[in-house]
Image (cartoon, rainbow, N blue to C red):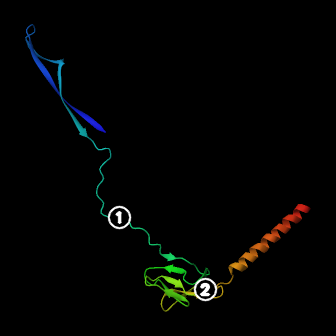
């Protein structure tokens, strides 16, 4: 956006009026001289200050990749971490960047070691918790069948 600054020089005529004998200043509009046209560039945005801490890095995607009870195969990454927040247990390996990965097929199991004061990740053959996903799915199917049976009985009567 450009603003135009006009430098205007007015020629003021000093005329002595002989009838009244006083000095009067008459601005003669015909004698306005437009001499200068200068263009001044003005900012369209307010200037911002400098920032010392204005940088940001991308996330490293650390954390749990497989949770307790989840099925894994050899080579699956279970945890990505910095340092040993989680320790490797049975049938798991530790990478040079502290990644814990699976060495065998099975289910992920987390236990807490009171001596080391940290979680231990291991792979077990059987589902490590009380109810397995297969049992839960079977129970849901049975519940849906009972619901359909009651709906069909109520539709008949």
Q: Which mark is residue 105?
A: 2
- Distance from Cα at disc 1 to Cα at disc 2: 43 Å
Quadrant position of the C terminus in the picture: bottom right
Which residue is pictured at 32% across the width and 64% down the height? Answer: 53
x and y percentages locating residue 151 in the rendered image: 84, 64
Mark 1 neighbour class, 10 Å CA radius: few under 14, some 14 to 19, many 20 or more? few
Q: Quadrant of residue 91?
A: bottom right
Helix, strand or loop for disc 2: loop
Which residue is pictured at 13% across the width and 21% down the height? Answer: 12
Q: Is residue 49 left or right of residue 18?
A: right
x and y percentages locating residue 144 in the rendered image: 78, 70
Q: Work out whether mark 1 precedes mark 2 in sequence or the reverse, and give the earlier one.
A: 1
x and y percentages locating residue 73 in the rendered image: 59, 82
Q: How many marks?
A: 2
Residue under pointer 1: 55
x and y percentages locating residue 31 in the rendered image: 16, 19
Which residue is pictured at 35% across the width and 64% down the height? Answer: 55
Q: Quadrant of residue 34?
A: top left
Is 101 in front, or is 67? 101
Q: Are marks 1 and 2 in contact (CB under 8 Å)?
A: no
Q: Is residue 119 left or right of residue 96?
A: right
Is 52 in front, or is 134? 134
């Amino acid at each position: 956006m450009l603003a135009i600054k006009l430098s205007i020089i007015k020629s003021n005529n000093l005329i002595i009026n002989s009838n009244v004998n006083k000095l009067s200043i008459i601005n003669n509009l015909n004698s306005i001289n437009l001499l200068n046209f200068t263009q001044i560039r003005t900012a369209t945005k307010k200037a911002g200050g400098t920032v010392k801490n204005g940088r940001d890095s991308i996330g490293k995607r650390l954390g749990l990749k497989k949770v307790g009870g989840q099925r894994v195969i050899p080579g699956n990454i279970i945890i990505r971490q910095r340092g040993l927040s989680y320790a490797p247990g049975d049938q798991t390996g530790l990478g040079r960047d502290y990644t814990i990965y699976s060495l065998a097929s099975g289910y992920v199991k987390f236990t807490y070691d009171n001596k080391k004061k940290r979680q231990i990740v291991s792979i077990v053959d059987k589902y490590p918790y009380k109810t397995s996903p297969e049992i839960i799915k079977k129970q849901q199917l049975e519940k849906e069948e009972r619901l359909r049976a009651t709906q069909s009985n109520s539709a008949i009567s």
